[in-house]
Amino acid sequence: MQNIRKGNLQPSPGRILISEPALRDFYFSRSVVLLAEHTDEEGSMGIILNKPVNLKLNDVGKEFPNVDYPLYLGGPVHPDRLFYLHTLGDKIPGAMKIMDGLYWGGEIQKLIELIDLKLVSQEQVRFFIGYSGWEPSQLNDELKEKSWIVASSSLDIIMASKPEKLWSNMLKKLGNDYAIWANFPADPILN
């Protein structure tokens, strides 16, 4: 895993948010969120990268009967909808570039066609139920409250990392000041 960078980074597409250990929200506790959009006027939108669910893609999408790709919880907004990240670029019309080599959404029918033709692998696409969203200034307020650490990332961290270890691995990569949090118990009362 490549090093990540933290400093006085500001939220922007392609950056990640790492939740502080004390954040107890059901969705965001021990979460790593990839930002897809961020503006002061419109708000922010992203996807939780490290919350696999106990379902497969073919359990929720009739369009994918022969596909057992893993499925992740992307956030609390529109939990009845399917979203996806991919590395397919222009092969999926309408895809939005988040960072070099990484895209959000696009024409789902084209993706289904490429999957049916076995031209897409699990390493090239990740599916999520719901997404994470913040109203204008809401994320900035949460940053002031120290709920999140903003860090840079890379394609290999986002697409190739083991989701179960992503939060603790990200903290360790931030250096000694944060590495201690990686071993912080999920429920300190049980310590």
Image: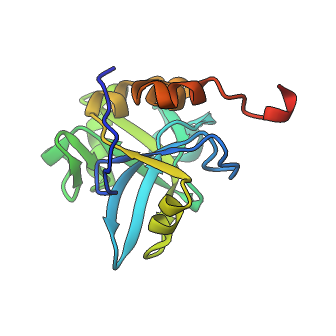
Asked if 48 appears above or below 96 in the picture, the reply is: above
Q: Is residue 163 visible?
A: no
Name the residue located 56 percent from the left edge and 60 percent from the top edge.
145
The furthest residue to the top: 1
Q: Quadrant of residue 51?
A: top right
The furthest residue to the bottom: 41
Q: Is residue 48 visible?
A: yes
Name the residue located 72 percent from the left edge and 28 percent from the top edge.
185
Q: Position of residue 72 (x, y in %)?
A: 53, 40
Name the residue located 34 percent from the left edge and 40 percent from the top edge.
6
> Which of these two is toward me, 48 or 60?
48
Quarter of the image with the N terminus in it:
top left
> Which of these two is toward me, 139 or 154?
139
What kind of colouring is applied to the model shown? rainbow
Name the residue located 52 percent from the left edge and 36 percent from the top edge.
50
Asked if 51 appears above or below 144 in the picture, the reply is: above
Q: Is residue 67 left or right of residue 97?
A: right
> Which of these two is toward me, 7 or 162?
7
Asked if 51 appears above or below 182 in the picture, the reply is: below
Q: Position of residue 175 (x, y in %)?
A: 42, 26
Q: Position of residue 79 (x, y in %)?
A: 59, 58
> Which of these two is toward me, 163 or 10?
10
Q: Is residue 86 left or right of residue 184?
A: left
